[in-house]
Amino acid sequence: MKKAALFLILMFPLLITSCMKGESVDVIIHNANIHTMNANSDVFEAVAIRDGKIVEVGPERQILNKYSAGEYIDAQKKDVYPGWVDAHGHILSYAKQTLSVNLIGCKSYDEMIIRIEKYQSKYNRKFIIGRGWDQSLWDGKMPTNELLNKTFPDIAVCLFRIDGHALLANDFLIEKSDVINKFNEDSELNQGGYFETDTIATLLGSSITQEGSFILQPTGFFADNAMNPIIEILPEFGQKELKDAILEVQHELLMYGITGVHEAGMNRAEFKIIDRLVSQRDLKINIYGMLLPSDENIAFARKNGFYRNKNLYVRSFKVFGDGALGSRGAFLKYPYADKYDHSGYLTTSLPHMRLIAEICHETGYQMNTHAIGDSTNKLMLGIYQEAIEVNPNHRWRIEHAQIVDPKDFVLFAQSGAYASVQPTHATSDQQWVEDRIGSERMEGAYAFKSILANTGRLAIGTDFPVEYIDPFRTIHSAVNRKNVDNEPSNGFLVNESITLEECIKGMTIWAAEASFQENSLGTIKEGKDATLSIFEDPVVANGSYTQNFAYMVYIKGKKVYSVE
């Protein structure tokens, strides 16, 4: 009897402690600055996680007293946010870029050739693909292929511009693809793209066209739809090397605390690659997929409706409305300031846009339209205005919205459109954009604050690999309107800057709303997915660029990245 009494006395403190702890959870993160990103912008110290969900977020003592956990994470006062999302990126394009010749940052045509030669001497490809050149970093003129032909006369060479909306091909590839004949025979290609030519005195090949007494030789420069016959014959990289490259992209995303990407445009083969990697649990980040509106993808949407496979969610189409400013393909209301006879073009005809809109109504899919020029933005917002009468909660998106006539800002509110913007485009383009569009149109350029005032939200991303994945460059560009070199010193169109909180909302709750996922993502709240990022250093927007990285990342309660 005495032994029993002694046993109860010894066990009593443990029983009390157990009762105080009460509920068991998997993980508790504490001693943290947890930014919930809720409507009140609440910041707490601790969060309890169980079965991949947030059980409770609150004060340190409350959470530690109420729950016991299998794992405790002392966050050391670090900032914790809902997992950040890149609302417009290209995982597959980036993976392919890492396997191609890296032309980013080339300061001259000669440097580009040297990089290609080094790449080919290492890999000995049967078909050379390069990505990332930007003529604004050298003489500003679009390159021609004379030196390319001389250096690589017997192998196809395809070099994509940094924005992916133009390419430089050598004559070998031009002949192989029959691009000129196909372009001239297809009105859809002809109206939504162009290629450049030089006049020459003698006939040099079947790819030459003739106008009157002039014989025209393609320079090798092709933009937008004119690229399609070339793109159609590009070889695919091997499955293993492509998979490895995709997983390297995932690692880089997680390194920056990015737990999700809105994959902006997948053909059927690309969708299958992503779907397979998700099924195999290799691809762990959340992917909101936008399908290209091909016949195959439309048939898939009609058959499957909204498609969910673990962390892959598909319920939208990506449509190309126009081209890019850098290659003068963006469709403007009035001609380019540096090319008076040219206003750009629609890369998808207006009747076909309306057809896709009808398919989106039929399937319930979101219509996400690439629209850069002010003319394209107005046309698409007009179509979206018609959509709001059918479905007030359509959430159709304008991707980029780079140049908008200030008179048209109100159309965002009237149409219910969501704007998906990329702040680093503004600070990358700032050196030359005024030369392209003229000073009068600058009022509506990269006007994030004005668009936000009319929509109440912005989905924010990078358009990687066009820009760097680094979200801290995004923050710096959005808030300080400067590039990573802190230029321009006074900021670029600073009246259109947004706040740090608004920028982070664009990568959390607003990105979730723009992908119909606000019930599971976007804020740290009871019942939502335990998808969150702990950052190494404080998340700030000082006057200069501040580099930062993730310290630890969780997706649905599972640790997927740690610096330790």
Image (tube, rainbow, N blue to C red):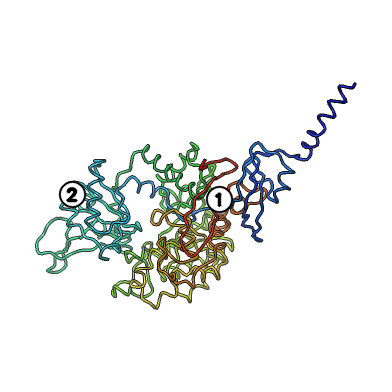
At horizontal 73% and vertical 39% (from top left) the residue drawn is: 23
Q: Cα distance, mark 1 to mark 2?
A: 46 Å
> Dot 1 corresponds to which residue?
83
**Mark 1 neighbour class, 10 Å CA radius: few under 14, some 14 to 19, many 20 or more:** many
Q: Nearer the viewer, residue 26 or 232?
A: 26
- Relative to residue 313, is residue 476 depicted above or below? below
Q: Mark 2: which amino acid?
A: Phe
Q: Mark 1: which amino acid?
A: Gly
Q: Is residue 62 left or right of residue 283?
A: right
Sequence order check, earlier mark of 1 and 2: 1
Q: Quadrant of residue 219?
A: bottom left
Q: Which is closer to the viewer, label 1 or label 2?
A: 1
Residue 445 x %, y %: 43, 71
**Mark 2 neighbour class, 10 Å CA radius: few under 14, some 14 to 19, many 20 or more:** some
Q: Nearer the viewer, residue 354 or 488?
A: 488
Residue 9 x %, y %: 85, 29
